[in-house]
Amino acid sequence: MKDRISIVVMVDAVGALSDRTLHNGNLSLVDDSSGSKHQGTPDLITTVIPGQVVQWTPIHIDVQTPVEIYSIEFLPGAPAAPPAGPSPAAPPPVDAMGSNGTENHDLLVWEGVVPYDMTPGVPYRYRLSLKLHEGPNSVLHVDSPALMRV
Amino acid sequence: MAQQHGIIVLFDVENALRTRSLAGNTYWFDNMKLFGSTGEGTEHLVTIVPGTHFMDGSQATEQVLNWLPAALGAIPPTVPRNYLAEQERADDRRTLDQLASLNADGGVSDTDLKRLQKRVGKRARKPAGGRGLTAAKLLDVTGKTTSSAGAYNYPAPVITDITGPAVTEKIMYPAQYGSPDMIYDGWYWAATVDTSRPGEYPYTMHVQLHELIEQNDEMIWESVDLTCESTLKITTDPKRNGFTGAGLGLLPLPAVPATG
């Protein structure tokens, strides 16, 4: 078993901003896990094993365009029964503020350990949000990639 | 992954040659305003370099600067660099063709001669023993022969060195690199930055401009060396985990994953 799985997020920032989408070939996801599906597409399903560290790294085609991962959120399904009591609040987004008062998502390292209670054989889809430069239209996302325990 | 920094330095060549100074004649522009650069479009640009480090203090992000010189009133930098050379050759060929096709039997008219003489144009030589520009015909910005001193095209400014506190204090390591991109004559200046010591560090850019002067009945491109200044502002912040805000933890998977 590999200790680490790398998922490389390749982005054509200018294409994505002018298309206002990460589809149309503006985003390509590739990992180094064996048995993953849809390599090179936004629909990548990465096979993982509990205990492995998964790390996401953005790479931009145009070296002078700012492209960072804004957030990675795993999408929950409908709960089988309504939870008793107040539902647990979503964790606050991690602060990406730099010491000079401007946000810099390059400060965030996107990696985590695959938990042992993950259900095998089921894709856990996640929302991958990317921030391209700044401004109201700078954050784009896809809901299609997933991790799957083998 | 952190982006590379582009820094455009736009020169008002004509005014700089007249005043023999780059003060008030440079316009600096970078792509780091979103991280806190100030003074874009002025000669007081402060370029932010947002460094990052790991918890053990080691530098986490390589920061790269690229300088892109440009001249007001010159041929746009996107036009191939051999444009003027090509135009010069084509113009000479046309002039020779027309000379050959003159019908000498009926006598050559003064008008024809004057027109062709004008087409031959003037050539600027390089200064004796000097380095720099090769001898070339004087062309205006559209590549046409010109004899008007006000219409000829200034050669692009050339960065000859980058010095100053940012260099002597080993904050940045500038160098000139060969480039397949002929836009900048196949050369460009770039630097990597040590972001471990935050602060403001000025630097001096040495620039060579070229002035056309008449000397002993010859036109000569004389080089004029000037300097201008800008500043780097280095910051550095610790990297942290995007999921936890601190160190490595479990991926925040939902109890039930979304279907579909």
Image (spheres, rainbow, N blue to C red):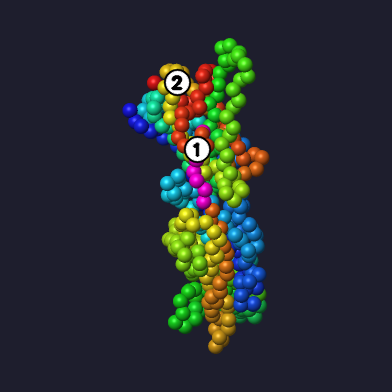
Q: Which residue is mark 2?
A: A118
Chain hosting mark 2: A
Chain hosting mark 1: B
Please state the horizontal and vertical placement of residue B54, each as a whole percent of the image: 45, 45
**Closest to the observer, A19 or B217:** A19
Which label belongs to residue B128? none
Q: Quadrant of residue B98?
A: bottom right
Q: Which residues are magenta?
A: B236-243
Q: Can residue A19 be seen in the rendering of this structure?
A: no
Three-letter residue code for mark 2 = Met
Three-letter residue code for mark 1 = Ala
Disc 2 + disc 1, Cβ < 8 Å: no
| B239 within the magenta span | yes
Tell me which residue sits at (50%, 24%) in the image.
B253
Tell me which residue sits at (66%, 40%) in the image.
A136
Circle 1 — which element?
loop
Q: Which residue is mark 1?
A: B246
The answer to whether B120 is drawn above or below residue A138 in the figure is below
